Image (spheres, grey):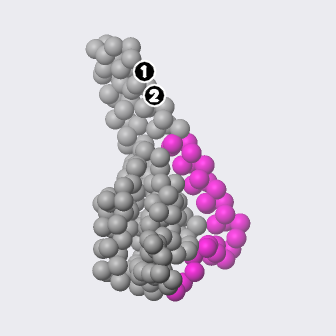
Amino acid sequence: MARRDVLDLAVLGLLHDAPLHGYELRKRLAGVLGPFRALSYGTLYPCLRQLLERGWVSEQHPVAPVRRGRIVYQLSAAGKEHFEALVADGGPTTWDDESFGVRLAFFARTQSSVRLRILEGRRSRLEERLEALGAALARSRERADAYTLELQRHGLESVQREVRWLGELINAEQASRTTDPLPRQTDHTPT
């Protein structure tokens, strides 16, 4: 998933909940995208413009004349369909560092089988990373200084923690599927 696609998913997902003006949307996106991804208005408004051009969102202009009225953006029917298609995707790009957190933020609207595929794919990707990090740490033990080794060890431990956490999420997802013989209902509502 390209960075723009991740931003599209986040914007459409937030507008799926309620119409928002740009300032509030930017504030909520910071919560979804994480504190280390500062999102400028120079990124948000071109994204909104593209979503408008595609017909996935619409604008509501202020009714009463005000000095500086805020334009409110809302999801269109086509935007809801596109959002549903995005959350139904469980392919390899959804396991990447760039998109996984945003995908996780909208898991409540994602089908259980897709959630499970994404979680298992992410865990598999991180297990591969663990192997590479372990090998790199073993190779650099003699050549690297103590601080570099600590940084590498910290990275290894962080990935190990995430793999354990993903295992817990996968177990919980599988348990919820086996205790309920009917397909699990989510907050996902078809349009």
Which type of secondary structure does the marked residue at label 2 adopt?
helix
Which residue is pictured at 44% across the width and 67% down the height? 22
Side of 65 where 92 appears, left or right: left
Which residue is pictured at 44% across the width and 32% down the height? 156
| Vertical position of residue 67 compared to residue 100: above or below | below
Could you classify mark 1 by the number of other residues whose Cα lies within 10 Å: few (under 14), some (14-19), or many (20 or more)? Answer: few
Q: Nearer the viewer, residue 190 or 71?
A: 71
Quick one: which residue is furthest to the right in this view?
179
Which residue is pictured at 30% across the width and 67% down the height? 46
The label shown at residue 78 is none
Q: Nearer the viewer, residue 101 or 119?
A: 101
Percent across and percent down for residue 143 are 28, 14
Q: Nearer the viewer, residue 171 or 33?
A: 33
The label shown at residue 150 is 1
| Amino acid tagged 2 | His
> Quadrant where the N terminus lies?
bottom left
Side of 181 where 60 appears, left or right: left
* Residue 119 can be seen, yes or no: no
- Count of marks placed on residues: 2
Percent across and percent down for residue 149 are 38, 20
User: Mark 2 — residue?
Assistant: 154
Percent across and percent down for residue 20 are 51, 71
| Amino acid tagged 1 | Glu
Could you classify mark 2 by the number of other residues whose Cα lies within 10 Å: few (under 14), some (14-19), or many (20 or more)? Answer: few
Which residue is pictured at 38% across the width and 36% down the height? 131
Which type of secondary structure does the marked residue at label 1 adopt?
helix
Percent across and percent down for residue 71 are 44, 75
CB-based contact (under 8 Å), mark 1 and mark 2: yes
* Residue 4 can be seen, yes or no: yes
The boundaries of the magenta stretch are 162-191
